[in-house]
Image (spheres, helix red, strand yellow):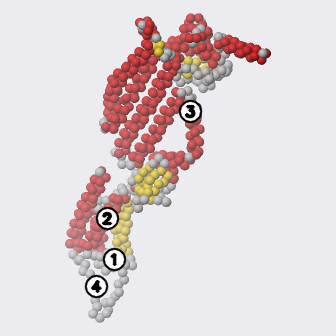
Amino acid sequence: MKYIVTLISVFLTQFLSFSQTQSKVDLSSPNATIYTHLYFLQDKSYQPKKAAKTIYGLKNDEAINKAIKLKKILDGKGLKVNFSKVPTDKNFTDTTAYKIGKRYVLFPIRLPQVSVEKYGDKWLYSRETVLIIDDLYKETFPWQIAWLQKVIPKYGNNTIFGVKLWQYLGLIGLIIFGFIFFFIFNKIVYFILKKIQHLLTKNSSEKVLKTIKKISRPLVLLFLISIIKRITPTLQLGLTSNEFLFIGFNAAQILLWIFIFLKLVKLLMIFYAEHTRRTHIKLDDQLVPILTHFLTGIVIFLGVLKMLTLFGVSPASVLAGASIGGLAIALASQDTVKNLIGTFMIFLDKPFHIGDWIETSELQGTVEQVGFRSSRIRAADTSIYQITNSKLSEIVINNKGLRLFRRYQTELGIRYDTPPKLIETFIEGLKELIKAHPNTKKDNFDVAFSGFGDSALNIMLNIYFNVNDWSTEQQAKHNLHLSIVKLASIIGIDFAFPSTTVMIEQFPEKKSIEINYQKEIENIKKEINLLTKELKNSNTNTTSKITQNDED
């Protein structure tokens, strides 16, 4: 029995103490002050005089008016105080705000103007907050509907699921207004964006117009949401409804901005891709997909960061977490980070371009692709080398594609019994062929009788081809070689090959082989002139065909 009486007395004591704390004004901490203000303006505990105690520097009706307006501002904007995060420390000090001191801001992101501050031993709504309450109220409720409530019939105030009938009509009116607004302004915004784009870029391709059309729609929706957000508090839907609606509005705005920036990235890359097509640097073409992925990642990251702050996550906490997470990922994937840095170094230094023939200590081939992590090199036998960009940016690269001229050196061996006069004619003919060739450097070449070989008289050719790629160089060599063979046929000299000559002239009735060389030098010169003209024409036709194939 005593045990039961003790439990009852303890329960009554706690109940009475709880009731006493609920009816008492407490201004000892930020949590207590904000709770006192909001608690005494609820329907079941409505005591505005006690709520007015939280207002700094005002008394009586003026303080009550400010307290009620502040409560309506919070409800109208759908701002619900999470008391679990409001400090209960009597000596709380805000070290993060622009004004360091005993001060607490209720909603730093969405409503930074409202704060409580300690004056003496009491926490009150700050002097700055009290001065700005009227302006905030006018901003939150730009359209007063007191006159509308007077003309609404009594049944218009009937509630369904906690919402009055006239408020339902207001929501339906907003929906109808939204459809009309979107239908009209979507065409107007699209027309304006198209004109601006045409003035800036002079580009009216179908791909650009489609992207602009996709940007115009979310822009109109953003304007529409901003207008609806201004009108919604006027409907006085209550804190719970406004909180839900404003979270939806803000989330929709963030998603629309993400969509718009993604389309802007796409539009920017379209213009950049067209610019790279007009340049001779093929490496820029490979930069387009890399930049697209990089900018897309930044837009999505910032959008997610903004979305997290909408749900009460501190941006500083998110950035700190992202930094720590990024450091952990970087340590765990050092090779990937090195390759990424190598990619940037390749695009900054431009040691080669797409299509260049490069040689390193490990491989040689044509650069086909520079990716985000590695590059692809195709060898002469068409096999593929895949090399990481970190390694490619560190090794020594001999870029054959950047040569101003491609040197070609060879020796022609003619028979030992070739007459000296024909040797001189052959050398002069070689010089004329080199001068006539459209792909050779005319002021820097060497043709000379270089020496005596084991089986031939050696004539050295040292020339430079003015070509950009390997395939064009081979075609130029082909034309030159074919002309040299024709020149030898015209003169009537033979190319030597490894052989041994046995002298049998002293044997009875045996004679040595005699070669009938053409002796008419003037006729030879005429035929050489015809050959040089033929070489010019054949190379001109070949060059035009190669150019046409490149354009195709």
Q: Amino acid at mark 2?
A: His
Q: Label 1 crowding class (10 Å Cα cut-off): few <14, some 14-19, many 20+?
A: some
Q: Label 2 crowding class (10 Å Cα cut-off): few <14, some 14-19, many 20+?
A: few
Q: Earlier in the sequence, mark 4 or mark 2?
A: 2
Q: Say which residue appears at 47% left-offset and 35% top-offset.
A: 299
In the rendered view, would you say 283 is above or below 90? below
Q: Earlier in the sequence, mark 4 or mark 1?
A: 1
Q: Can you tell which of label 3 and label 2 is closer to the viewer?
A: 3
Picture coordinates of residue 164 (x, y %)?
Answer: 46, 13
Verify CB contact (< 8 Å) between mark 4 and mark 1.
Answer: no
Reading the image, the residue beneath label 4 is 513
Viewer-closest of 6 and 529: 6
Q: Say which residue appears at 26% left-offset and 73% top-offset.
A: 489
Tally of numbered discs:
4
Q: Amino acid at mark 3?
A: Val
* Residue 114 showing in the rendered view: yes
Q: Which quarter of the picture shows residue 312? A: top right
Verify CB contact (< 8 Å) between mark 3 and mark 2.
Answer: no
Q: Can you tell which of label 1 and label 3 is closer to the viewer?
A: 3
Picture coordinates of residue 337 (x, y %)?
Answer: 53, 46
Furthest-right residue in this view: 2
Q: Earlier in the sequence, mark 1 or mark 3?
A: 3
Q: Earlier in the sequence, mark 1 or mark 2?
A: 2
Reading the image, the residue beneath label 3 is 318
Q: Earlier in the sequence, mark 4 or mark 3?
A: 3
**281 displayed left or right of 44:** left
Verify CB contact (< 8 Å) between mark 1 and mark 3.
Answer: no
Q: Say which residue appears at 39% left-offset and 20% top-offset.
A: 175
Reading the image, the residue beneath label 2 is 478
Alpha-carbon distance for marks 3 and 2? 65 Å
Reading the image, the residue beneath label 1 is 496
Picture coordinates of residue 151 (x, y %)?
Answer: 41, 6
